[in-house]
């Protein structure tokens, strides 16, 4: 980094020094000297430029190596870390989808069991009240006792079944641990890639300075904004509470819509 | 009452379907984006459309606009159930003629309220 700064500093001080000399020699009419100076200036600039391009190329190369992307072997068995990350994220989607479906399956299996038990309990309860009021005759009571007995057996089996489902629902939440680990690794990779890209951008900017290239950042940003499809949607907002242009919940939506006359 | 649920995530479709069933709406069908939803809407005599915003193929907002521009479908009540939470987007959906807007994550109570409100207004 320091070296880069000094080579750019060299170039700039040479540029300044030679520029003055150049004006002087032109004023004195020494065109030979002037051409010589321009030649020297060019040489200093080219040297710096080649150096920076060289560094950029080396850095690009090592970046490619560190991502395990081998351009010579597109069919290489070793998949790049980026492809790997994509696969890991698809795995997260698959796992969360599986867990959600498993949970809903278990809830759907439990609901009818509970509904049946609840319906049976309420009819039995009505008959039991009649028995307590001594409105049930002996033969009917025998029937009632048989129903109570079978209800007790069924409610035991039913609650055992539902308890099992609840247990499985808890187990289905293990996706949180697995996906958490995967996502942490991908986040790590993204951070690495970002810092490597930043290094490359810094190096490229040195090349730009030697070559005198300036980028129109505003235009670049405008082009980027245009690429964003306005109707595509943005997905969930992560920092909804910190942003003015984002609603923080259903109440906010309702307020906004009613202010529009909804 | 026949309802079409449009969302690209099958779990979300299932959640909405279950909530609707609890509210007494048992006649539901599903589509995973606007492109698959449109032919179903054209041929299926649906009374109500519940759609997500962000979907591959055709987004929910485009589906809403297409429905409103269609002579046969333009009166179909549309409820948007989406994670899109920018004020501009909600205004955009309102201007495109949405009947209700629910942001994810939502509760069964909110979905029930919005649906009832829409039917109240449609029937009055």
Image (cartoon, helix red, strand yellow):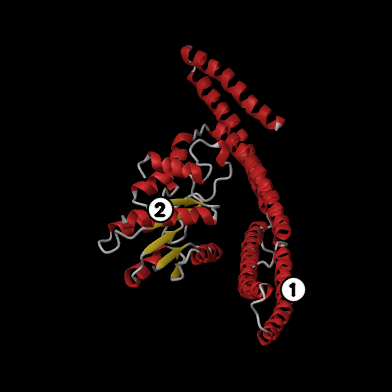
Say which of B61 and A36 sits in front. Answer: B61
Say which of A252 and A100 sits in front. Answer: A252
Q: Position of residue A136 (x, y in %)?
A: 65, 80
Where, by quadrant of the figure, is residue A48 drawn? top right
Where, by quadrant of the figure, is residue A144 drawn? bottom right
Residue B80 vs A104, above or below: the answer is above
Q: Is residue B64 visible?
A: yes
Residue A59: numbered disc: none
Subunit that carries the residue with mark 1: A
Residue at the limit of the structure toward the left, as seen here: B71
Q: Residue at x 60, y 24 (%)?
A: A12
Q: Residue at x 52, y 51 (%)?
A: A235
Subunit that carries the residue with mark 2: B
Q: Is residue B55 left or right of residue B72?
A: right
What is the quadrant of the C terminus of chain A in the image? top left
Secondary element under disc 2, as helix, strand or loop, is: helix
Q: Is residue A131 left or right of residue B77?
A: right
The residue that mark 1 highlights is A160
- Is disc 2 in contact with disc 1, using a CB cutoff of under 8 Å? no
Q: Position of residue B34 (x, y in %)?
A: 40, 62
Q: Is residue A83 left or right of residue A220?
A: right
Q: Is residue B62 visible?
A: no
The residue that mark 2 highlights is B117
Real-space Cα separation, disc 2 to disc 1, in angstroms:
41 Å
Secondary element under disc 1, as helix, strand or loop, is: helix
Say which of A138 and A95 sits in front. Answer: A138
Mark 1 is surrounded, within 10 Å at the Cα level, by few (under 14), some (14 to 19) or many (20 or more) other residues, namely: few
């Amino acid at each position: 980094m320091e070296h880069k700064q000094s080579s750019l500093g060299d170039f700039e001080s040479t540029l300044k020094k030679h520029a003055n000399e150049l004006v002087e020699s032109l004023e004195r009419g020494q065109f030979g000297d002037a051409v010589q100076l321009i030649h020297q200036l060019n040489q200093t600039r080219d040297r710096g430029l080649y150096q920076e391009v060289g560094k950029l190329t080396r850095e690009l190369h090592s970046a490619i190596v560190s991502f395990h992307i081998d351009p010579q072997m597109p069919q290489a068995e070793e998949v790049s870390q980026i492809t790997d990350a994509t696969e890991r994220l698809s795995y997260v989607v698959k796992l969360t989808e599986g867990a959600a479906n498993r949970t809903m399956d278990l809830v759907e299996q439990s609901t009818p069991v509970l509904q049946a038990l609840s319906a049976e309990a309420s009819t039995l309860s009505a008959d039991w009240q009649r028995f307590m009021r001594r409105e049930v005759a002996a033969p009917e009571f025998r029937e009632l006792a048989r129903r109570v007995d079978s209800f007790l057996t069924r409610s035991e089996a039913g609650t055992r079944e539902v308890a099992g489902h609840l247990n499985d629902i808890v187990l289905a939440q293990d996706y949180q641990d697995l996906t958490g680990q995967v996502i942490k690794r991908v986040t790590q990779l993204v951070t690495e890639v970002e810092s490597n890209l930043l290094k490359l951008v810094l190096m490229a900017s040195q090349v730009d300075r030697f070559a005198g290239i300036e980028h129109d950042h505003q235009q670049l940003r405008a082009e980027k904004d245009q690429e964003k499809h306005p109707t595509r949607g943005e997905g969930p907002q992560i920092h909804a509470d910190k942003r003015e242009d984002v609603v923080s919940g259903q109440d906010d939506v309702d307020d906004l819509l009613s202010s529009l006359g909804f | 009452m026949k309802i079409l649920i449009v969302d690209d995530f099958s779990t979300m479709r299932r959640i909405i379907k279950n909530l609707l069933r609890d509210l007494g709406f048992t006649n539901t069908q599903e589509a995973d984006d606007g492109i698959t939803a449109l032919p179903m809407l054209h041929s299926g005599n649906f009374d109500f459309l519940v759609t997500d915003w962000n979907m591959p193929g055709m987004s929910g907002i485009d589906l809403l606009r297409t429905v409103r521009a269609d002579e046969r479908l333009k009166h179909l009540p549309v409820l948007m159930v989406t994670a899109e939470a920018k004020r501009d987007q909600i205004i955009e959906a309102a201007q495109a003629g949405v009947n209700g807007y629910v942001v994810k994550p939502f509760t069964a109570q909110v979905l029930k309220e919005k649906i009832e409100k829409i039917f109240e207004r449609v029937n009055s």
